[in-house]
Amino acid sequence: MELSGDAKMLRIYIGEADRHDHRPLYEAIVREARRQGLAGATVVKGLMGFGKKSRIHTAKILRLSEDLPVIVEIVDTPEKIEAFLPLIDSMVDNGMVTLENLEVLLYRHSGGT
């Protein structure tokens, strides 16, 4: 797949404990993005954060959180991202979704798996 020039990044802020169809929501989103042929997705687990209710979630040893922040980032052409948005809307019950314009300078795969 080629991807260069104008693109969009879909960023989805959710909690580690969020679920969709009995699996972690971040996993369901990434699997659906792959199934739909999007260029790529990355899941990042946060060490600390808070959301709409201002409750602190942290990974500190003495305060084990069961719902650390998770960010899912998906980059592709504006058309493919726009087409993916209704699915995200139906999957995300709690969280925040942002969309950014960006320019892809390099998107390579060296072979292998």
Image: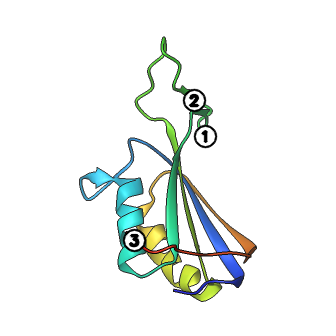
Give the numbered dot on residue 51: 1
Question: Alpha carbon of mark 2 to alpha carbon of mark 3: how far?
Answer: 43 Å
Distance, label 1 to label 2, CA atoms, is 7 Å
The image quarter in which residue 27 lies: bottom left
Mark 2: amino acid: Arg
Q: Which one is earlier in the sequence, the residue at label 2 or at label 3?
A: 2
Which residue carries the number 2 mark? 55
Element carrying mark 3 = loop
Residue type at tag 1:
Gly
Mark 3 = which residue? 112
Task: Find the distance from the CA under tag 3 to the CA under tag 1.
Answer: 40 Å
Residue at the spot 41% in from the left edge and 64% down from the top edge: 30
> What amino acid does circle 3 point to?
Gly
Quadrant (top left/top right/bottom left/bottom right) for the C terminus: bottom left
- In this view, 113 is above or below 70: below
Does dot 2 land on a helix, a strand or a loop? loop
Count residues near mark 3 (Cα–Cα under 10 Å), then give few for <14, some for 14-19, many for 20+.
few
Q: Are marks 1 and 2 in contact (CB under 8 Å)?
A: yes
The picture places residue 7, in percent across and down from the top left corner, at: 68, 80
